[in-house]
Image (tube, rainbow, N blue to C red):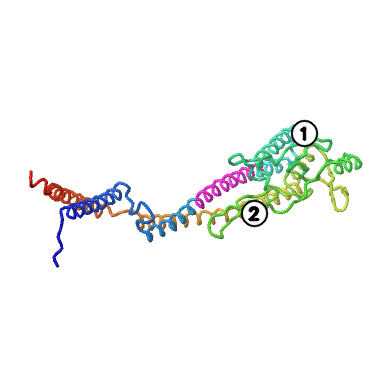
Amino acid sequence: MNVRITNNMMVANTVRNINSNASRLSKAQDQMSSQSKIQLPSDDPVVASRAIKYRSYVAKIEQYQKNTDNAVSWQEVTDNALSDLGDVVQQIRDYTVQASSDTLTDEDKAKIKTNVEELKKQAVQIMNTSYGGRYVFGGYVTDQEPYQIEATDMGDKVTFKGSYLGGLVSASLDDTAITDFYTDNAVYTTDGAQSIQYNLGYSNSITINVEGQDAIGESSANNLFDTIDKLLLGLNGESSYKTVEVTTDPTTTVSISTSTLDLDSVLTDLDHDLDRLLTARSDLGARMNYVNMTKDRLSTDYNTYTKLMSNNEDIDTAEVSMAVSTAEYVYEASLSVGAKVISNSLVDYLR
């Protein structure tokens, strides 16, 4: 049975084909202008699914890279501060050696004392080093200067996080006055490790900070500032000093002992302070190496996943350019044919 093909059927088919070719051209042009294989997930669900996964990986890597850059900067600032502090301690040691000479006059020792006092202030400034407005040696307390020099009846004492650090005082001070002072005022005791952790990857975090007490020390008569105070007492002509031990559990108890002061023991203490400082810096250096290795690995991962993402989503420009040209040719051809078909109606023939 023959089926009659009407003019309306030919027109409808022609319009449908023109629309189909227009859609093909539009899709090719969209790919060329956006340089992307898909505009909507429905264009290619497989590519869309991979795109979500790869973009998620790249976004996480970018965040880890930011964390790593911040960790590197924090650690470099800390390392520079520890290096500067080492120079200060070494200068104090050199002055101690000079002060040990029997040929120095009282005026010479007074000049050395003035220099050591300035170096003590410089050490405090270094231990208040900040990065991005955060103090690097204060543990979790990063918004307040951790170290201060306070003028007290016990002399100029250094505080750490608001509590007096150590207890080395002049032997000329009265025991009752010493006891009252240390009973009435807080003395620093360790509050546990306060490690600031940065997340550098999947299940990969690292401590970026060095706590002040790890570089300075905290035990009474066994920290850098007590060593400096001992030297200052010696330069002031004193031959003995008192060490104050404070316990707060269950009640505050102050124990005072007297020791002979000689500059040779100060040199020994300074060497111990330098060793502690070197240990803190070595530990930091090991962590800096790890962070730098992680930074390199993240850079490799970033290149890998951005390449996968590009291969998944980006078009082949030459291929799509040819597709656009072909689609344009086909579309124009369909328009040309359509113009003839649509105009060839019975009415047009009768005219």
Residue at screen point 77% across, 46% down: 188
Q: Secondary structure at mark 1?
A: helix
Whether residue 277 sits left or right of residue 233 in the image: it is left
* Label 2 neighbour load within 10 Å: few <14, some 14-19, many 20+: some
Q: Is residue 259 magenta?
A: no
Instruction: Name the residue that disc number 2 marks.
Output: 279
* Along the line of sight, the residue nearer the viewer: 191 or 104: 191
> Bounds of the magenta span?
63-88
Q: Quadrant of the N terminus?
A: bottom left
- As for residue 65 lying within the magenta part, the answer is yes
Tell me which amino acid carries mark 2: Thr
Q: Quadrant of the C terminus?
A: top left
The spot of residue 350 in percent (x, y) is 7, 46
Residue 309's x, y, as percent? 39, 56
Which one is in front, 233 or 163? 163
Q: To which quarter of the image does residue 151 belong?
A: top right
Q: Residues within 10 Å of mark 1 (few under 14, many from 20)?
A: few
Q: Position of residue 103 (x, y in %)?
A: 74, 38
Give the residue number, with chain letter if any, for mark 1: 106
The Cα atoms of the two marked residues, 2 and 1, are separated by 36 Å
The answer to which of marks 2 and 1 sits earlier in the sequence is 1
Q: Disc 1 residue type?
A: Asp
Along the line of sight, the residue nearer the viewer: 46 or 260:
46
The answer to whether residue 255 shows anywhere in this view is no
Callout 2 secondary element = helix
